Image (spheres, grey):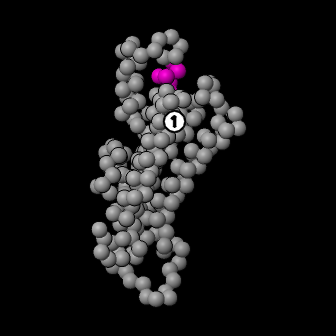
Amino acid sequence: MPSTPSQTGLLPAGGTATKGQRRSLRAWLAEPLAPTSLTAPLFLLTFVNALLDAASYGSLHVFSTCMTGNVINFTVQITGNGPTGGEVQGRLSSVGTSLLAFVVAGFLFGHLGHAVGDRCRGWLLSSLICQTALVAIASVLVSADVIHTADSLNWLLVMLFSLAGGAQVAMAKGCGNPLVSTVRPFLLP
């Protein structure tokens, strides 16, 4: 458990704030957070991603953030041990879409985070806003009956969910928190 304010991420490393001193918004957003102060939010994101995976697998037959599950699904499909007929093509394209979107988002968000500062408040907030927007767009498309889960456009839902999942994993990897092991090691150099 952190014992000093600078270890909790409330103050900049080596910095002290006197009573009544105000920092600018820019300084507050640029301030890096300690990895241990991010444990609870990362566990919450992990739980939300598990819910997203359960929902996407239940309705779209593909995982949006669990790429290990998608690789297993892909292997089952190409070895002929899964469903047959036209359903196979749909599932293979969904798995491919999910894998591609996840890797692209992980690569982009991982390198952007590395460039601006993986644990800076501004980057973490920006990344979370992007992830939330991607999931919200998918939710609006389904709620407004623009896309149905049995529709030929369900690849768009898979892509949006997987982009959000890739961004989340890149963000978690950049946080450097050893307590949350849901990240993949290939996203950052």
Res. 111 in view: no
Does residue 91 belong to the magenta stretch? yes
x and y, in percent, of residue 188 in the image? 35, 49
Name of the residue lying farthest toward the bottom: 19
The residues colored magenta run 89-94
Observer-nearest residue: 171 or 38?
38
Q: What amino acid does circle 1 point to?
A: Ala
Q: Main secondary structure of the magenta part?
A: helix
Q: Is residue 113 above or below residue 47?
A: below
Does residue 181 belong to the magenta stretch? no
Give the total of numbered labels: 1
x and y, in percent, of residue 8 in the image? 36, 71
Does 22 sit left or right of 113 as displayed? Answer: right
x and y, in percent, of residue 164 in the image? 50, 45
Q: At 32% across and 57% down in the image, what residue appears? A: 177
Dividing the picture into quadrants, the one containing residue 82 is top left
x and y, in percent, of residue 131 in the image? 53, 49
Name the residue beneath numbered marker 1: 55
Observer-nearest residue: 129 or 116?
129
Q: At 49% across and 22% down in the image, what residue appears? A: 91
Q: Mark 1, residues whose alpha carbon is within 10 Å: few (<14), some, or many (≥20)?
A: some
